[in-house]
């Protein structure tokens, strides 16, 4: 027959409401006295040494050093029903020691010698084997008892004196009594019911892979008790490793809840968060021992527990979550109760209480119903601080959002094994003294203004989060040398120097500041004026990259940086965030040195979309080993016509932005133009035109000079050297014989003067200009110059003074293109033609002399008369 759960609770309740080294009378639902004596943890070597009262019906001798049980030890205990001898060193039991204990229904000999033999045991009780381990205190026993074997109520039973203190019987929790009464009734009923009738395995909570999930089930206390019924569901309960009853609105006290967990021998984790659990109001510390030897995790957060003074939990718990439970104090006995606790979470609770002044006889008491609060203290009152004790083994403590102003003075000396401490979102104004073992500290969202020199003593600290405080100054020599990650964003720093004192720093967050620039400083090996939270940084040292060789993650977002100079960022960076700054360009000199960078976060609307951004848009954004976050949201602010457009779509071409290429292309174009012009000049006598242009300019200047009023020459003769013989022998000799004064270059050009000067002089000082035209004339550049300037004189003086003498026939199409003026003159001018026939020569000389004797008429008249009636003079 299985264990009767009723007897279990019957015995547990007896143990529960006792004091150490004493006894009390427990009124059961049947209203009879049940004397119980607890002698645990007294270092007893024998049962008789305790001198227990013979009228006791339950004796607890567990956790002592008893080695032997004799007949004499148990003589006279005629009404003894429950005997607990667990957790001793019993090796021998004298035969017949239990024979006269006719009322005995339960004997616990667990955790004794495994070879222990029990001779002479009465036939009705059934005991646990000595080797069976069921917990730190074996509170439930196996027995096989009929209803007739139950002892009758003893009306004469007397309430025994409690040796350990006043009885707590009068203050027994009502709900706990009702629960015990119901379970006892069910136990009595189960003693006569058949096994088949009591078997309900389908109603039990069956674990899946060791986990029983009853979360969000909205079970009542009775329904939960039925699912965890030890009498019906023992097999299922033994298989539970993790239990989840969170978010179920369960209403019961914590001690009653743990009574249901007693049969779960293998449970390791219990989540009872988000319910309506309350703390038991009775102080049962003396017998607060549970047989849950494997339980290490307990989550009772978000429950209205309110106080830890009467907390009764298994001491094996290593992780406990008491967040948002309305507790306002950690009592002095907490460390002793939770001696194995390593992780503790109490965030969301407010360690605030009221300091009430002592009421003396001289001060009148306020009338009933009046609440008088003298002051509220966040730190201490006459009784101490809200944090009065913590387990020495605690390694992980989270106390965020608890209205803490300071830590107690004993904290640094007691918490020698603490590794993680979260004090964020409190009202701490001074950085407290901390244990040297600490590795992770979060004290963000507080009111800290300075970091003291004593902070360096936290010699094992690797992670430090102090964002959103009011720090005005921070010295790197005050920081632990082991620091690898630091978040100092959103502070009030004026300067922050990062020297080789922080040589192991890998993560640095200075976001949300007012940093204006990062530029190399002269000779300082520090990050000067780096503002942390809403800070102002003026310059960055030249050796910043050397001072922080391990820095890999750097967050500079949310500042006022407009430009990052070369050397302002360490080359060891892997991730960099420069978003939401005033950066206008990203240049190769700065970011090209970051060879290890793999992630760049950049956002903003201040970029100058000019050629300074060419490298970033066309090269850096397409780097195969670099991920640029936010590049699709970058906006241009300059030039005005591209304001608001995407940087990624900027049309920044290499031709537009590369000065070298521009110069090369310009040079190539210039060379090409020169070559083309040279070719054209060579093909179309360009050199001649250039020289002609120069001479024309010289002639243009000459027109401003004073012209002679009386011209000394009648005519200036322009001829080719090929035609010099005819000109001298025929033309000059005949004209000078006729009395004309002729000017020609071989005789009348002034020695030492420029040729052009002589040409200008002779043309300007002659009434007429004779041109001896022949094929050799059109091949002479000087003849063409003379023709050009003579035509220029005609245009300038508006008088027709040109006389054309065609020595040999010149078809207009045979004249080269450069002699365009000559071709025009041949088409519109009257000219004289030399003929080898003698009779025609007389007419030629007569006409030439007549022309030389005529005065120069206006050009318009000449053109309207003679030019329109062109004919050949023969």
Image (cartoon, rainbow, N blue to C red):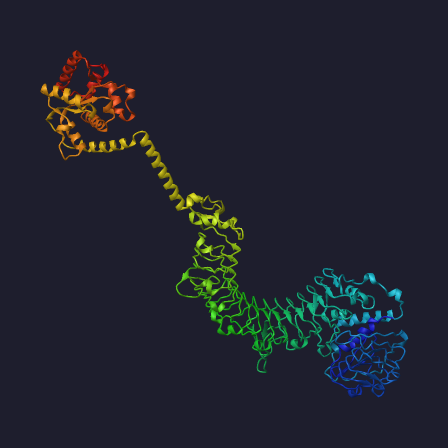
Q: Quadrant of the N terminus?
A: bottom right
- Where's residue 375, x and y in %? 55, 73
Q: Is residue 530 visible?
A: no
Q: Quadrant of the C terminus?
A: top left
- Which residue reaches farthest top? 839
Q: Nearer the viewer, residue 761 or 260?
A: 761
Vertically, is 473 above or below 827?
below
- Where's residue 378, x and y in %? 56, 72
Vertically, is 803 above or below 590?
above
Residue that appears at 40% across and 65% down:
523
Q: Quadrant of residue 561?
A: bottom left
Q: Is residue 518 visible?
A: yes
| Number of on-image labels | 0
Horizontal arrangement in the rendering, residue 781 relative to residue 524 (left or right)? left
- Where's residue 82, x and y in %? 82, 79
Q: Nearer the viewer, residue 740 or 370?
A: 740
Vertically, is 830 above or below 139?
above
Q: Quadrant of residue 69?
A: bottom right
- Where's residue 824, x and y in %? 26, 22
Q: Nearer the viewer, residue 592 or 521?
A: 592
Horizontal arrangement in the rendering, residue 670 relative to residue 146 (left or right)? left
Q: Quadrant of residue 379?
A: bottom right
Horizontal arrangement in the rendering, residue 243 relative to residue 151 (left or right)? left
């Amino acid at each position: 027959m299985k264990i009767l759960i009723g007897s279990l609770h019957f015995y547990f309740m007896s143990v529960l409401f006792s004091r150490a080294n004493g006894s009390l009378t427990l009124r059961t639902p049947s209203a009879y006295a049940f004397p119980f004596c607890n002698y645990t943890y007294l270092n007893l070597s024998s049962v008789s040494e305790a001198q227990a009262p013979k009228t006791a019906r339950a004796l607890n001798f567990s956790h002592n050093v008893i080695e032997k049980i004799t007949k004499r030890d148990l003589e006279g205990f005629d009404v003894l029903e429950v005997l607990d001898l667990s957790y001793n060193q019993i090796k021998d039991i004298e035969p017949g020691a239990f024979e006269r204990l006719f009322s005995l229904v339960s004997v616990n000999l667990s955790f004794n010698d495994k070879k222990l033999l029990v001779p002479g045991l009465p036939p009705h009780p059934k005991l646990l084997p000595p080797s069976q381990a069921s917990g730190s205190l074996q509170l439930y026993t196996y027995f096989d008892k009929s209803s007739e074997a139950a002892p009758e109520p003893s009306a004469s039973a007397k309430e025994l004196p409690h040796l350990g203190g006043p009885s707590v019987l009068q203050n027994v929790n009502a709900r706990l009594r009702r629960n015990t009464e119901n379970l006892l009734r069910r136990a009595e009923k189960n003693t006569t019911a058949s096994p088949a009738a009591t078997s309900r395995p389908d109603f039990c909570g069956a674990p899946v892979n060791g986990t029983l999930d009853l979360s969000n089930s909205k079970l009542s206390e009775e329904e939960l008790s039925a699912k965890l019924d030890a009498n019906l569901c023992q097999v299922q309960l033994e298989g539970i490793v993790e239990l989840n009853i969170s978010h179920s609105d369960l209403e019961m006290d914590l001690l009653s809840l743990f009574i249901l967990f007693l049969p779960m021998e293998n449970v390791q984790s219990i989540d009872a968060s988000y319910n309506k659990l309350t703390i038991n109001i009775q102080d049962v510390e003396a017998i607060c021992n549970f047989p849950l030897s494997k339980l290490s995790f307990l989550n009772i957060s978000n429950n209205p527990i309110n106080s830890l003074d009467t907390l009764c939990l298994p001491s094996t718990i290593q992780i406990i979550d008491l967040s948002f439970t309305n507790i306002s104090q950690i009592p002095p006995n907490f460390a002793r109760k939770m001696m194995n606790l390593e992780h503790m979470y109490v965030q969301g609770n407010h360690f605030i209480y009221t300091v009430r002044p002592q009421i003396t006889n001289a001060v009148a008491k306020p009338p009933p119903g009046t609440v008088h609060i003298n002051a509220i203290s966040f730190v201490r009152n006459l009784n101490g601080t809200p944090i009065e004790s913590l387990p020495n083994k605690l390694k992980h403590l989270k106390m965020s959002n608890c209205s803490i102003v300071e830590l107690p003075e004993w904290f640094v000396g007691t918490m020698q094994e603490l590794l993680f401490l979260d004090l964020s979102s409190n009202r701490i104004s001074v950085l407290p003294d901390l244990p040297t073992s600490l590795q992770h500290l979060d004290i963000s969202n507080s009111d800290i203004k300075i970091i003291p020199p004593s902070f360096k003593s936290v010699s094992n600290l690797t992670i430090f989060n102090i964002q959103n405080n009011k720090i005005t100054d921070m010295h790197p020599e005050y920081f632990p040398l082991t620091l690898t990650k630091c978040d100092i964003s959103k502070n009030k720093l004026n300067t922050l120097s990062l020297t080789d004192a922080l040589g192991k720093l890998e993560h640095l967050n200075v976001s949300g500041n007012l940093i204006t620039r990062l530029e190399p400083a002269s000779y300082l090996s520090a990050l000067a004026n780096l503002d942390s939270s809403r800070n102002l940084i003026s310059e960055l040292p030249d050796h910043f990259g050397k001072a922080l060789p391990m820095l890999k993650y750097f967050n500079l977002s949310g500042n006022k940086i407009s430009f990052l100079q070369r050397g302002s960022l360490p080359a060891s960076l892997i991730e960099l965030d420069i978003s939401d700054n005033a950066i206008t360009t990203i240049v190769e000199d700065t970011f090209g040195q970051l060879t290890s960078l793999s992630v760049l976060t950049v956002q903003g609307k201040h970029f100058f979309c000019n050629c300074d951004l060419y490298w970033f848009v066309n090269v850096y954004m397409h780097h195969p080993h670099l991920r640029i976050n936010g590049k699709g949201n970058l906006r241009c602010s300059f030039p005005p016509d591209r304001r608001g457009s995407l940087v990624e779509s900027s049309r920044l071409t290499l031709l537009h932005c590369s000065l070298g290429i521009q110069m090369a292309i310009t040079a190539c174009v210039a060379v090409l133009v020169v070559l083309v012009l040279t070719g054209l000049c060579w093909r179309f006598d360009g050199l001649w035109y250039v020289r002609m242009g120069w001479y024309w300019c010289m002639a243009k200047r000459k027109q401003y000079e004073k012209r002679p009023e009386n011209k000394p020459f009648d005519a200036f003769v322009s001829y080719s050297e090929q035609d010099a013989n005819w000109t001298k022998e025929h033309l000059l000799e005949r004209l000078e014989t006729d009395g004309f004064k002729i000017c020609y270059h071989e005789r009348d050009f002034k020695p030492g003067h420029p040729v052009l000067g002589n040409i200008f002089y002779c043309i300007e000082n002659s009434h007429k200009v004779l041109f001896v035209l022949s094929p050799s004339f059109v091949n002479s550049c000087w003849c063409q110059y003379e023709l050009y300037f003579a035509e220029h004189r005609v245009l300038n003086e508006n008088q027709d003074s040109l006389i054309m003498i065609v020595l040999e026939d010149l078809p207009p199409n045979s004249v080269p293109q450069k002699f365009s003026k000559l071709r025009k003159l041949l088409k519109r001018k009257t000219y004289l033609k030399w003929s080898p026939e003698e009779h025609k020569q007389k007419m030629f000389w007569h006409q030439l002399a007549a022309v030389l004797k005529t005065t120069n008429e206006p050009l318009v008249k000449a053109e309207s008369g003679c030019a329109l009636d062109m004919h050949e003079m023969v």
